[in-house]
Every structure is written in C-alpha cells, then in structure tokens.
Image (tube, grey):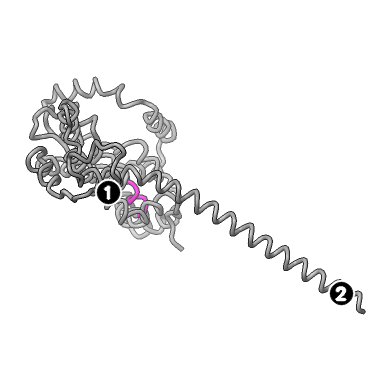
Amino acid sequence: MATTVTGGVSSTTDARSLRRKAERTRALERSVIHVILLVGSITMLFPLYWMISTSLKPQHEVFLLPPTWFPSDFQWIHYRQAFVDYFSFAQYGTNTMIITLGVLVGRLLSASLVAFGFARIRFIGRDVIFILVLSTMMVPGQVTIIPLYILFKDLGWLNTFYPLIVPSWFGGGAFFIFLLRQFILTINPELDDAARIDGCGWLGIYGRITMPLIKPALAAVAIFSFLGTWNDFFGPLIFLRSRDMLTLAVGLHFMATAASSSVRPNLPHLMAGSTMILIPPLLVFFFAQRYFIQGVTFSGIKG
C-alpha cells in the first residue's frame, strides 16, 4: 500500500514538474516573440519618427553630425510654410480626393457586379473568361501605358481626371474581382434560391442578399483602393499636365526635386509635406483595420 502511495505521489510530482517546465517554455517563447515584434516595430516606426522629427527641427539642426534626436525648438511654422508658400496643399488635396473617391465608388460597384456574375451566374465560357481576367494581373502597367495614352489622347481626355477615374468603373481590376468572387462563393446559394422564390431577379439578389453579406470584403476593397489611389504617382504624372491638376504625390515630387537642386535643401519643409500627406492613409487604415482583416480572412455567411 505504501509503495502505491509513493508511486502516486511520484507521478503527481513528475506531472507538476512537466507542467512547470512547459509553462516556462511557453513564457520564454512569448518573451522571444515579444522581443522580435518590438525590434521589428521600432525598425518600421523609426523612419516615421525621423520624418516627423525633421519636420519640426530648425534648419541648422538637420545636417548636424552626430544627428540630434529631438528638436531643440519645435518649428511648427514649417507646416504653414510648406503648404502655403511652397506647396498648394488645398488644391492638390482637392484633386487627390476627387480622384480617390471617384475610383473608390467605381471599383466598389463594378468589381462587385462582375464578381457576382462570375460567382453566381452560369454561362458558357465563364471559367475561361475568369482565368483570362486573372491573367491580366501578370501584365505590368507599364506595358499598357502607351496604348492607353494614345487612346485617351484621341478621346481628348489628357489633362483631365477621366483617365484616372473612368477605367475603375469597368470591372475595377482583376484583384478586386477575385477577392469579392471568392467571398461571394462562401455565401450559401440557398439564400439566392429563397430570394428567387420571392420574385427577386439577379439584380435584386445582388442588392438585397449579396451586398449586405459582403460588407467586410467591400471594406477591404475600399481600403486597398483608397491607399493605392491616394499614393498613386505614375498615373497622374503621365495624364495630368497642368500644375493646377496635380495630385499630392506628384506635387510632393516636384517639391522634392526643387529641394534637391538647391545647395542646402529645405528638408524640414519637405518632411512636413510628407507627414501631412501620410496622415489620411494612416487614419483610414487605423480606423478600418478591423474591417480590412475581416474582409481578407472571414467568410461571407454569418451564423
């Protein structure tokens, strides 16, 4: 009997020892992961900090060696000078917002319609056409820029916002079609059958059934579209000629070019401009990141 008790106590002690060892191992793993994440975060955030810090430094502190990590005197006037004296922020910001909203609405409507057709409507050659649509993602934009430029030139659309907005109303892009189609496929098709029994056509199913269930995916498309269009440099540089029609990205480029051509470039003004242009995308992603993650990872059916 004593041997049995002793064996039981020994087994319990071994189990506790293994449990403590496993807990220490998990704690060590978590600590290592946290350290890696901390180092990675600092590495990614340091350029952002340096940009903001430089925008607030006096001009003479920018080129000091060793560098100064904190401004000795916060020069908030750099922001006013950058966007009033050197940079037409109001005009360029208005142009950028018009293009961004136009592209955003066009992509949400057209990409969702095309994706709904590929996911729900059966027609001859549907899969072949879908593969052809996906294959366009392998074609670099630089390959099609010359024929597009000639097309828009013949249409008289150069130096207007049409070349930047109108194409998004015709499909919205293969990536967004693919993303929304895959999300729509997760919706139970029995919901469509029930809607047809109630007299809904395809557009009714699209508007009343599909669109409310794919809100997370639409949010992901909206975020991708906003960030891509807001930061777009190549398109506005090619199709816009007048200085009053420029966007923030192109205007900042011209500002940087002017700064680099001088003997002592005014980097605080350039960093102030970069900081202000970066704020809207950061705010959009910060407040909408939950919907962005849902759109990429969650299914479209809610239990």
Q: Which residue is mark 1?
A: 70
Asked whether 8 falls inside the magenta stretch, the response is no
Q: Which residue is mark 2?
A: 6
Q: Nearer the viewer, residue 284 or 191?
A: 284
**What is the residue that sits farthest to the bottom in this orientation?**
1
Q: Secondary structure at mark 1?
A: loop
Marks 2 and 1, Cα distance to the nearest angstrom?
66 Å
Q: Quadrant of residue 122?
A: top left
Measured from the top left, where is residue 287 in percent x and y?
30, 56
Q: Nearer the viewer, residue 246 or 111?
A: 246
Q: Quadrant of residue 273?
A: top left
Lateral position of residue 54 relative to residue 196, left or right: left
Q: Nearer the viewer, residue 234 or 123?
A: 234
Q: Is residue 113 visible?
A: no
Sequence-wise first label, 2 or 1:
2
Lateral position of residue 137 relative to residue 35, left or right: left
The tag on residue 246 is: none
Lateral position of residue 150 relative to residue 142, left or right: left
Disc 1 residue type? Answer: Phe
Measured from the top left, where is residue 71 in percent x and y?
23, 48
Start-end of magenta stretch: 216-222
Q: How many marks?
A: 2
Q: Secondary structure at mark 2?
A: helix
